[in-house]
Image (cartoon, helix red, strand yellow):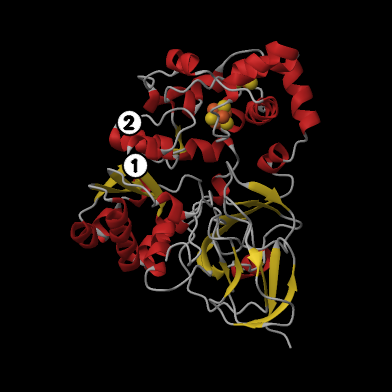
Amino acid sequence: MVRDAGVVGAGGAGFPTYRKLDARVEHLIANGAECEPLLQKDRECMCREPDTFFRGLATMRQVTGARRVTVAIKHKNADLADRMSRGAQEAGCEFFVYQDVYPAGDEYVLVYEITGRQIPPGGLPLHVGCVVDNVETIVNVGKAIAGTPVTEKYVTITGAVRQPLTTVVPIGTSFQDCLRAAGGCTVDNPTLLVSGVMMGSVTRDMTAPVAKTTAGLIALPSDHYLVRRKTATRETYTRIGHGQCDQCSFCTELCPRYILGYPVEPHRVMRTLLMTGEAKERGSLWAQYCCECNVCSLIACPESLDPKNICVDAKALLRANGLSRTPDELQQLFRPAHPVRHGREIPIKTLYQRLGLTPYDRHAPFVERDWHPQEVQVPLHTHVGQPARPIVGVGDTVAAGDRIADVDPDQLGCPVHASISGRVKSVSSTHIEITTRK
Ligand code: SF4
Ligand code: SF4
């Protein structure tokens, strides 16, 4: 039922949820820690649909056989533990309240904080007896077992907009329709950070659609520091990094994966900019387990260099050459978590100041809206695995909730459903466009 309803990781990963549930585990963790600053869609989702959330959680517990269930939230949302205490008691789960730091929602961090177990390098929570799922994904599981497919998405729309808000939109709604719902932008020619200021992507394409994995839209002036950093070309960040890195190693000392014990050392990866051949390949191995959180580039480096993107490029080199740490190396390099780890996590207020986001630190309350977009472009490949294959043609009439694209049963992936009723206007390998216009 979870597969048929098209449930995938709604926190951004897009991993098909049915596959995660195909396991017996000891511990189920509902991730409501909302890693990315400025977003609050997870909070609003839990507040608005607590019964569905606990129904989904109970199902997942039953399927996985989990003995312990924990709901992880940030300190700023600690009131949720009281507001949802009755449901939590009935579901036999406990709340875990973490500091307002970045990256609190990283599953490696949560699993360690809650269970004391370190996920093996490059491994999954499953390898230490855990399943971690985003709270909106769990709400979607609750809906799936009631027969309702995924056709809507919780999103926070904030930044340089008149009225920041969190709302639920039909999947495939255009970014410009979302911005209109927030009263429009307060700057000309904004740039959008999609799904987060730290790990999100950048676009100026306002016709792009909301996907099952879109957590939010943050509009910023196109000359904002973050936009300039995130749109720097490879040629630029490589050339500057090559000439300017003084090997202070702040990037490594603040790296969330390094301080959790993993062999990730971005300052060593920066050295590879001066290397070729085998030396470059060996140095690139220090990037292998980088989670691309951007702490090194956007917070740690005093020179505003870009070790994160140098790590991304180093990982591409490793993949292209089939290189990896050996088990012996890992045994030697994988350590216990750093004793002063908590002193090196990034407080969210500090992050706002460093990144020029303090003016955008505004409440984005839930606003109920009756969405009737005239057109939606439903994406077919926002999940991990095989892209969904269209099963409707141009001119077909569809109703909201109808299956419009499918994935072969033996393949990893999920079907896709119409998010509005209307006529199929176009079909491509990436999208199905549905219109209400005649
Ligand atoms: S992006 Fe930087 S800080 Fe984050 S895990 Fe990778 S190397 Fe570490
Ligand atoms: S923090 Fe910046 S300057 Fe220092 S080692 Fe890392 S990339 Fe180089």
Q: Position of residue 418 (x, y in %)?
A: 59, 74
Q: Is residue 32 among the parts visible in the rendering?
A: no
Considering only order in the chain, which callout, 1 or 2, is on the residue closer to the N terminus? 2
Reply above or below: 89 against 169: above
Q: Residue lying farthest bottom?
A: 438
Observer-nearest of 69 and 206: 69
Q: Position of residue 381 (x, y in %)?
A: 63, 57
Reply above or below: 419 against 253: below
Mark 1 residue element? strand
Q: Position of residue 277 (x, y in %)?
A: 74, 13
Q: Residue at x 40, y 62 (%)?
A: 141
Q: Residue at x 47, y 62 (%)?
A: 3
Q: Three-letter amino acid code at disc 2?
A: Arg
User: Ligand 2 shows up in which quadrant of the image?
Assistant: top right
Crowd around label 2: few <14 · some 14–19 · many ≥20 (10 Å): some
Q: Quadrant of the C terminus?
A: bottom right
Mark 2 residue element? loop
Observer-nearest of 257 and 416: 416
Asked whether, in this view, residue 274 is left or right of residue 3, the answer is: right
On residue 283, which mark appears? none
Residue 52: quadrant of the picture: bottom left
Q: Position of residue 269 (x, y in %)?
A: 63, 19
Assess whether mark 1 and mark 2 are in contact (beta carbons under 8 angstroms).
Answer: yes
Q: Which residue is mark 1?
A: 130
Observer-nearest of 238 and 115: 115
Q: Which residue is mark 2?
A: 117
Q: Three-letter amino acid code at disc 1?
A: Cys
Residue 394: quadrant of the picture: bottom right
Crowd around label 1: few <14 · some 14–19 · many ≥20 (10 Å): many
